[in-house]
Image: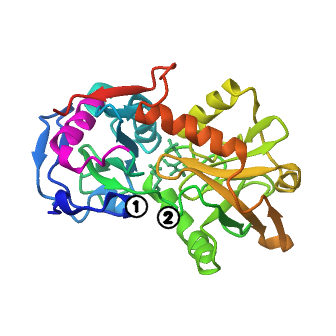
Amino acid sequence: MSNAENIDWGSLTFAYMKTDYNVRCTFKDGKWGEIEVTQDDHINIHMAATCIQYGQEAFEGQKAYRGRDGKVRLFRIRENARRIANSARGIMMEPIPEDLFVKMAHMVIKLNKRFIPPYGSGAAFYLRPYEIGITPRVGVNPADEYTFGIFGMPVGPYFKRGLETCKVAIYREYDRAAAQGTGCWKVGGNYAAGMRATHRAKSNGYAAALFVDPTEHKYLDECGPANFYAVKGDIYITPKSSSILPSITNMSLQQLARDMGYKVECRPIAVEELAECTEAAECGTAAVTAPIEEIYDHANDKTYRFGNKVGPVTLALYNRLRGIQCGDLPDDYGWTEFIDVD
Ligand code: PLP
Ligand code: COI
């Protein structure tokens, strides 16, 4: 168990840390059972469980923040609840009821309240909900029994330099998901499929791989752990694609961009169109907004450059989003909910 009193909140990275408790609930005999609170960070499952053999696994990610007012806020958690239910349906798992998901999210935050980073530290309490098929099967069939659990830990930014710019690379020879496959669901298999490209990108000094559409290899899709957007004149453009995850952060940024007077276009973006853009960024719960300095298109040996400082639109979007998440700005859209931790 980690000692929360000794955590240097400002130097946290995006890494696992054992906290006090995690929660679990199992679907068996056609119904969800009691919520179990445990200190054990292992799961004892059958070696032939469908999650191990056939990848029946889906997960989520969301953050809770302590505000200047001392209150703890959770961001758009019902969107995560709906998305994991959708991911579950996508790979033939039992969808988790929305209220059960939200109840367990609140429990994990309350039970680990000493691990919630203080206001202004740049860190957040990250929730990792997951669902796995646990029925033993050697024939390829969905499980009958499922475990849904949530653990959480304090984290720093995913891209370790936060609002400092990063570089990403396009390698058209790797797809993370098929056009009509699982890319729009948050299932573990997509992340395994993206690891080779990500490994190559990192080995070459890039922060991430930026995937293109798996049909024509012409249009931008998303990064391994985050969505993508760019700024072109007074337009916030972001890819429309059947193989990317519908990001809650991106959806929120689109609204904030409109509020700032920008047009929003969600449409296929050809790689070459990057030449007309002034800013580019990755966005997601873990990544928040990570401004991109360079995009290297390996197939054409071409580099698109956006400057080595965060651009004004991304900076303004970041400040608005963070401001709402931490309670520094009014939450006009009702995106946050309070967690009664004390
Ligand atoms: N795309 C992928 C592949 C992701 O893993 C994530 C992270 O959840 C995102 C996009 C961003 O989604 P969200 O903003 O809902 O966290
Ligand atoms: C998140 O942003 O919450 C994610 O789940 C991305 C993850 C792969 C780190």
Residue 30 visible to the viewer:
yes
Q: CA distance from mark 1 to mark 2?
A: 8 Å
Is 236 positioned to the left or the right of 93 in the image?
right
Instruction: Point out which mark residue 88 bears.
Output: none
Q: Secondary structure at mark 1?
A: loop
Q: Which numbered disc flags the more N-terminal residue, 1 or 2?
A: 1
How many marks overall? 2
Query: Do the CB atoms of the residues marked 1 and 2 lie less than 8 Å apart?
Result: yes
In the foreground, 234 or 105: 234
Query: Residue at label 2?
Result: 160
Is 24 positioned to the left or the right of 160 in the image?
left
Query: Which circle, 1 or 2, is nearer the viewer?
Result: 2
Q: Is residue 161 above or below residue 206?
A: above
In the rendered image, residue 324 lying in the magenta stretch gets the answer: no
Give me the residue at 70% from left, 26% from top.
Answer: 258
Q: Is mark 1 within 8 Å of ligand 2?
A: yes
Q: As shown in the figure, which amino acid type bears the numbered disc 2?
A: Lys
Identify the main secondary structure in magenta: helix
In the foreground, 117 or 220: 117
Q: Quadrant of residue 214?
A: bottom right
Query: Residue at label 1?
Result: 14
Give the quadrant of the N terminus.
bottom left
Q: Which residues are magenta?
A: 102-119
Give me the residue at 48% from left, 22% from top.
Answer: 330
Q: Is residue 177 above or below residue 335?
A: below
Residue 63 drawn at (x, y percent)? 38, 43
Give the quadrant of the C terminus.
top left
In the rendered image, residue 107 lying in the magenta stretch gets the answer: yes
Residue 301 drawn at (x, y percent)? 84, 74
Residue 256 drawn at (x, y percent)? 62, 30
